[in-house]
Amino acid sequence: MSSRSYSPAQAANSPITSPLLPVEPLTRYFFHDGTVLDVSRDMATTLAHIGRLNPRDEAGYLRYLAYAAEIHRITGPVFIYDQPPTPASFLRVPVRDMLKVDAWRTMSGAINSFVQTPHLRQLLGRFATYVGASPYAAPATLNVIADVELNGGVWYPQGGIYAIAQAMAKLAEELGVKIHLNAGVDHFRPWPDANRPHHLHCHHQQNRP
């Protein structure tokens, strides 16, 4: 999992996902021609791997990371970490920033403008698959995904993914939430007030907020 929304210190001590362990290397890529390419938490190590393929792509990769980070800066507060976007959300984005999200090129077109090595182009293009898209058709805005992993790092929750569910349940109970297990739901009714919890009606049980 990536932990872009946390600083390293926060990620290591989050009340929900603690402890998160940094993964090294972030990823290891194996190509059909036998090339192996590691992406490391240490930028110098990553650049050394890239330089063996094409020294010119070291600078291109750094420019690409800055480009992806800029898209994240613009889209994060409005579209990623906020409520589902609405027309009003778009009005919060300055016009000059709207142009920077690069919505008119494809991911592949943007990537190709930064790096030349086919291996590196394929590596960066594969982030489209995180949303089931193709880098040859998806808008370049989705290069934001690369920033989350390549700049934010990859973290492993000790105990596996299920440990996150257990930690969330523990935190919920500490906040006074009652968790009902093995209870089938007959129907679900949201409250008119969006700030109130939703209402569930479970099999053979009374309504439960």
Image: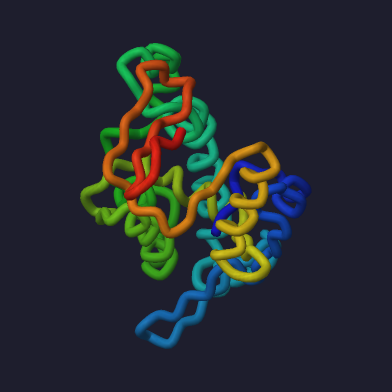
Q: Quadrant of the N terminus?
A: bottom right
Residue 142, image x, y percentages:
37, 44
- Determine if residue 185 is in view: yes
- Determine if residue 51 is in view: no
* Horizontal side of residue 161 vs 185, given as left or right: right
The foreground one among 49 and 168 is 168
- Residue at 65%, 68% in the rendered image: 23
Residue 88, image x, y percentages:
36, 13
Residue 177, image x, y percentages:
59, 40
The foreground one among 31 and 26 is 26
The image quadrant that residue 121 belongs to is bottom left
Is residue 112 depicted above or below 95 in this figure? below
- Residue at 54%, 40% in the rendered image: 69
The image quadrant that residue 89 belongs to is top left
- Residue at 59%, 66% in the rendered image: 26
- Residue at 30%, 16% in the rendered image: 87
The image quadrant that residue 206 belongs to is top left
Residue 50, image x, y percentages:
55, 67
Is residue 91 depicted above or below 86 in this figure? above
